[in-house]
Amino acid sequence: TRTGTAGPAGPDPTAYPAYPVDLDDPIEDEDVPSAGPSRSRKARVYTGMAALAVTTVLAVVVAGQLTTTGKTRSDAVSAGDDSGRAVPGQSAASRGDGRATPGAAAPAVPELTFEQKMALQFPIDAKLKGPGTFDTVPGVAKAPGKGKLVRYRVDVEQGLGLDPQLFAEAVQRTLNDDRSWSHKGAMTFERVPGGEADFVITLASPGTTGFWCAKSDLDTTVDNVSCDSASTQRVMINAFRWAQGSVTFGPNAMFAYRQMLINHEVGHRLGHGHVSCRTPGALAPIMQQQTKSLDLEGIHCLPNPWVFPSS
């Protein structure tokens, strides 16, 4: 295609077909008498010249139109036919149909909410034994209430492949819920990163959980459970249970199970012992060992994540 503002160029003599002119014969002027065969040749020459003139005019007209519209035929084919007619060499499916072009960025996947993440199970080995080293979740989560201030730290064992921020947020939200130990302003919980913590809520592999619980003469290896290691600073949350839950709650109640796990083990740290359900069909008390069973002494109770469930 041409560029600039100049008018259409003249015809290219190499772009047109040869006409039946015998260039070896001299072309005679029509005023000079000649024999019959010579006139026949002159007629063919003039006919060819006339055709050449017509072709030249058409080329100029077409070139002018293309300059005006700003398109060549190749432009029209590559851009598609605005009239909706099929373009030769191009299928209907290849014309503009709203589909993404190759190399276009994929749509962004929306970030899951806290509630959505808490409802998921996460993959983990039930026999995992981590390195026994921990990372403290940084930052402060201020206590929202005005009751007795309880400070805690959150440690997460390295190499678990679980989200430390999700765990820390779950602890803070759960403990400061009015259905938890902060009920009616009794106390308020604040997460801190330093040594002024009253205890350390620790998310750890089954192997490391067993190691720390054994320091307080507790065996968590039989049912792969959690514990409050009372002789140490650590409230141990078994990462297998955090990730996979329990049969008693089932896979569709992961959010509630995690709330129960936090409330139960922190309840031990606050001085509460185990309690069993005594009314068939009632909600199990928070200090019942709900991970192990909801059936005790022939009494079946319902799973319950809260200290004060009716609040």
Image (cartoon, rainbow, N blue to C red):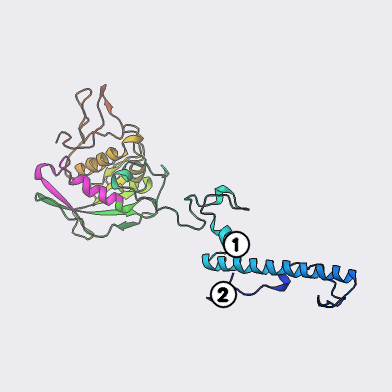
Q: Position of residue 245 (x, y in %)?
A: 34, 38
Q: Position of residue 287 (x, y in %)?
A: 21, 36
Q: Name the residue under label 2.
A: 7
Disc 1: CA contacts within 10 A as few (<14), some (14-19) or many (>=20): few
- The local secondary structure at tag 2 comes to loop
58 sits left or right of 238 in the view: right
Check disc 1 and give the amino acid type. Answer: Ser
The answer to whether residue 12 shows anywhere in this view is yes
Q: Which mark is residue 289?
A: none
Is the residue under label 2 in contact with that under label 1 (CB below 8 Å)?
Answer: no
State which quadrant residue 21 falls in: bottom right
Label total for image: 2
Quadrant of the drawing holding the N terminus: bottom right
Residue placed most toward the observer, 64 or 54: 54
Q: Earlier in the sequence, mark 1 or mark 2?
A: 2
* Magenta residues, start to end: 166-190
Q: Is residue 217 above or below residue 247?
A: below
The answer to whether residue 297 shows anywhere in this view is no
Q: Position of residue 297 (x, y in %)?
A: 25, 23
Q: Residue at coordinates 54% horizontally, 54% vertically from top-left? A: 81
Q: In this view, does 93 lie above or below 252?
A: below
- The local secondary structure at tag 1 comes to helix
Q: Does the magenta stretch include residue 189?
A: yes
Check disc 2 and give the amino acid type. Answer: Gly
State which quadrant residue 214 falls in: top left
Q: Name the residue under label 1.
A: 74
Distance in Å between CA atoms under marks 1 and 2: 20 Å
175 sits left or right of 39 in the view: left
35 sits left or right of 93 in the view: right
Q: Does the magenta stretch include residue 110?
A: no
Which mark is nearer the camera, 1 or 2?
Answer: 2
Residue placed most toward the observer, 94 or 181: 94
